[in-house]
Image (spheres, coloured by chain):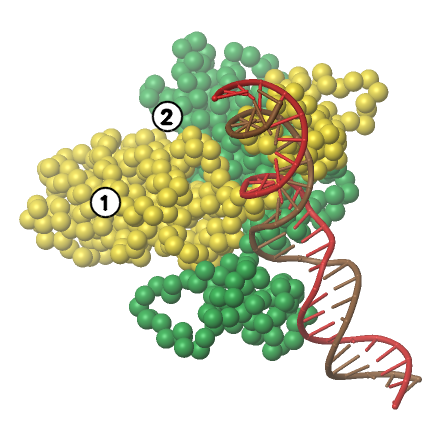
Chain colours: A green, B yellow, C red, D brown
Amino acid sequence: MSGEGSKRKRPGTKGEPANVAPQPARVRTVKEIATIAKVSVATVSRALQRPELVSEATRLRIHEVVKRLGYTPNALARNLRTARTRLIVALLPDITNPFFSEVIRGIEQVAHENGYSVLLGETQSSLVREQAYADMVAGRQADGIITMSHRVPAIPIDGRLPVVNACEYVRDSNISSVYIDNVAAAGVAVDYLVTLGHRDIAFIAGPSSSPICVDREQGYRLALQRASVSADPALTAIGDFSIEAGERAIERLLSQGKSFSAVFCSNDEMAIGAMRALISHGLRVPEDVSVVGFDDIRFARYTSPPLTTIAQPKNALGREAMTMLIELLNDPEVPPRKRVLSADLVVRGSTAPRATGR
Amino acid sequence: MSGEGSKRKRPGTKGEPANVAPQPARVRTVKEIATIAKVSVATVSRALQRPELVSEATRLRIHEVVKRLGYTPNALARNLRTARTRLIVALLPDITNPFFSEVIRGIEQVAHENGYSVLLGETQSSLVREQAYADMVAGRQADGIITMSHRVPAIPIDGRLPVVNACEYVRDSNISSVYIDNVAAAGVAVDYLVTLGHRDIAFIAGPSSSPICVDREQGYRLALQRASVSADPALTAIGDFSIEAGERAIERLLSQGKSFSAVFCSNDEMAIGAMRALISHGLRVPEDVSVVGFDDIRFARYTSPPLTTIAQPKNALGREAMTMLIELLNDPEVPPRKRVLSADLVVRGSTAPRATGR
DNA sequence: TGATTTTATGTAATCCATTACATTGCATTG
DNA sequence: CAATGCAATGTAATGGATTACATAAAATCA
């Protein structure tokens, strides 16, 4: 505790060189501000948090001091005391995946509207990483989590976990989730291929650990069933959502001598890989093989041909997820909800009627 | 894979959700742990932080209690006391931009090697957003910042700012930075076009507020100079790094009746847009017009034709940035450094010798 | 005017973990 | 055996802000 404070506020010190970066004073704490402004710490805190509780004169004086000395309250101390951080962490497996960016944007919109900040954690689908970020909540460094993975990390706290699942969901969990009707969406995609005359439709699936991928596969199967086409299991390949996986899947199908006139892919990146592999094998898209993706990432319209795909309502998914999380943070008693949005087929150039010759 | 969920279900525990964290006890503080383990809080803290200071028996007992009750120390309290968070924030203008993802990965690698966690903040180039994240450092919620923007937010603290600039830099600042030699890299790209016989080389620049874009433009100019080609200012367009900007730039150039046999773009996305616009105007890439990008994003090899571009050492940029930041955090006295890496030209299919007929 | 409410401010407890310093007991050494 | 050192543990101060409660002064009311 220093008597220095009073010295520092001498009127003589005001002349400072203008071109030099304003040498920040070393004021750090409410206490110092209080001393200098000749009030108590409580008043300083009030002037900053709830100005209406402080008389105009004092408030102005305090603000002047705060500004002049460049004081920023220590958020750790504040959060420790108030047990809130107004920070949420959004977990995504892979920031590289353009699908997530718009979801994030939706999250951030709602977050800011409600005074929250969003921090992003890339997990690379590693449980360890997920857990590390989840521990931030347990350690009270963040208020909640929106996870875009199909796993919900364990957070050892009382009551409801402040966690919302976006885009993915966990079966039988009581975690609130927002996602699309993947069965229906995949069905629409495959139905469309069927109306184009395709019968031999290959499927490049995502990892079966993820419920939404299982759903997409089911949508594919049901659509084939509706079209009275018996699904050939050998026409299904599994990939990990990467472009390379899409290429490999096509390689495999072709090398097995399978014939197909269309491919439905569980995401756009695999579709891009698929198109590339097809083309490099001398097949034309869409004349010889139609390709449909899933997600409608930003690049989908810039591939050649532009990709026909299922457009997820990415922004809405994000907004809804954050809305749910805020609801949950405000009232831990609200029952978990699963909100299912719908997705639309966007027809571009990668699909065409089945060539009659084949 | 997630058979775990069903296994855990026991007869009689119907109310329990299948896939969620085990029942949390309500133990919260060292104090409670101390009481239960019949030791003092100091011993609990030591058992957790510096186990070697505690006798084996006590340590085991404490750990057992901690584990059994699912206790996680309050990180806020800890950080408040120790004045370190082991958390750094990486600021990027746009998570959508695939260029950054690999840089981030480099940052995270080094961070984890050194016990730091990384949180991502998307700023959308908004000063307000940047400032908000920067305030986390002032508020002691994070130890430092790596920013990938050409602005360095003000952080009112004493001494050196714990900030490192990655990919971008600020002229005349004393902020440590890592970036590539943009003048040289752009030069290499344009030199290459010149060796292919091109003389009328258009340039799609990035925002001139960013020093690296100015550098790229200068590299372009110098290369033309080397080739004794007088730069036609009308062949330069400015874009904002988006695909659409690339398209618009080409539209503009074409509508002005400018003739050019090659385009050099300040980033890959604009190059993708440029190719698209050229093609939709009936021009062939690379037969009629060669296109060169910058960055070598993941999609660059999947465009058609695959994009010739300047490959930035993205991972190295990230690693180096984080290394510098750690250095700085460990010793605020180390002088600021500018580290300049080099970048290579990757030749793919979007460039070809100038058509002789033109 | 005296009583009561309202407004402005202050004092001190509190959030929770870390750690300097203090204490205890035991082993080692001369 | 006294002196010394070390290991293990405890007590209490500490970090910085918030806020319940207390008090003083001013405004309102009867």
Residue A277 vs C5, above or below: the answer is: above
Identified by mark 1, the residue type is: Asn
Looking at the rendered structure, the number of numbered marks drawn on it comes to 2
- The residue wearing badge 2 is A276
Q: What residue appears at the point 58 percent right and 66 percent down from the top-left corner? A: A34
Q: Quadrant of the C terminus of chain A?
A: top left
- The residue wearing badge 1 is B182
Q: Could you say where residue B271 lies in the image, as x and y percent from the top left?
A: 30, 42
Q: Could you say where residue A290 lies in the image, as x and y percent from the top left?
A: 45, 26
Q: Could you say where residue B64 lies in the image, as x and y percent from the top left?
A: 68, 23
Q: What residue appears at the point 49 percent right and 37 percent down from the top-left corner? A: B117
Q: Quadrant of residue B311?
A: top left
Residue B171 vs B59, above or below: the answer is: below
Q: Quadrant of the N terminus of chain A?
A: bottom right
Nearer to the camera, A87 or B276: A87
Q: Is residue A244 visible?
A: yes
Label 2: chain letter? A
Residue sticking out furthest to the top:
A256
Q: Quadrant of residue B352?
A: top left
